[in-house]
Image: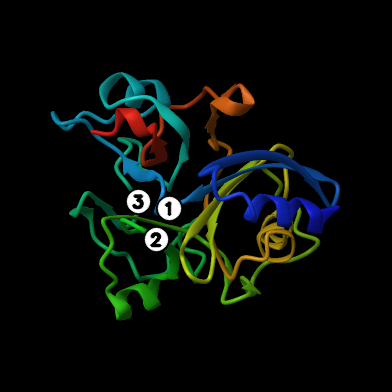
Amino acid sequence: MRWLWFAVLWATPAVAVTCENVDYAGASYTTCTVDVAAEDLRLFHSDEAGEVLGSFDAIETTIGPLSFAMNAGMYHDNRAPVGHYLERGVEKMRVVTSEGPGNFGLLPNGVFCIQDDAAWVFETLDYVARRPACRDATQSGPMLVIDGALHPRFLAEGTSRHVRNGVGTTADGDRAVFVISNDPVNFYDFGTFFRDFLQLPNALYFDGKVSRLYAPTLGREDIGFQLGPIVGVLDDEDRR
């Protein structure tokens, strides 16, 4: 069944954003797969006046209707990004390479990079070395999957369980797969979903506890805390 789902998902190029509910290893997940070249995938943080958007509704009111969105990185109390943040070529926060407290500082962490026709997850030091030409980028942590391997500090018996969300990218960067767990899971379980079920070579953790998803094809619009960085896809006819 897993291989059938995977084959159908990747063999349907006409559907550029596909959201699905999936059961794997005793937990439920929702995945939203984006064909990056076909869709207007971008990051959102502030409006033109510098006010933090903070919600899916605010993006739709200010910019245009969304076909998918989720929170996309950790943020301070004022909702400023904790790590590197780049939107439409403008850097709002520098890259942070040092170890630190919390999940963000659980090295290695990484950067999600969006280009016009591709998207990539890079380990942070690799990102700094490569200096890829990203249009948008958000740094978060920890990395979930690094070149096909789980983060070295993940434990199968880990007791910290939360609803979590993150993103993985294909080897050639043509698709980005965004995932939110619908059940509390630990880092090991969340990482193995990206590595073993989705078979993605690199994946990055966005957050837990505050994880939110907007997937109108599933009738889903999570509400809760005001957010910092958000990633989403604008509907074609409403691109601005």
Q: Quadrant of residue 66?
A: top left
- The first of marks 2 and 3 along the sequence is 3
Mark 1 = which residue?
Answer: 36
Amino acid type for the residue under numbered disc 1? Val
Say what amino acid the circle numbered 2 marks. Ala
Residue 54 position, x and y percent, is 36, 29
Q: CA distance from mark 2 to mark 1?
A: 5 Å
* Crowding at mark 1 (Cα within 10 Å: few <14, some 14-19, many 20+): many
Q: Is residue 132 left or right of residue 225?
A: left
Colouring of the image? rainbow
Q: Position of residue 228 (x, y in %)?
A: 36, 38
Q: Quadrant of residue 128?
A: bottom left
Q: Residue at x 23, y 33 (%)?
A: 240
**Among numbered discs 2 and 1, the one appearing first in the sequence:** 1
**Number of other residues with Cα within 10 Å of mark 3, as a class: few under 14, some 14 to 19, many 20 or more:** many
Q: Residue at x 51, y 44 (%)?
A: 16
Q: Are marks 2 and 1 in contact (CB under 8 Å)?
A: yes
Q: How many marks?
A: 3
Q: Residues within 10 Å of mark 2 (few under 14, many from 20)?
A: many
> Which residue is disc 2 drawn over?
118
Estimate the spatial distance between the alpha carbons at disc 2 and disc 3, rounded to whole Å.
24 Å
Amino acid type for the residue under numbered disc 3:
Val
| SS for dot 1 | loop
Going from the N terminus, do you reach mark 1 or mark 3 first?
1
Q: Which residue is mark 3?
A: 82
Alpha-carbon distance for marks 1 and 3? 25 Å
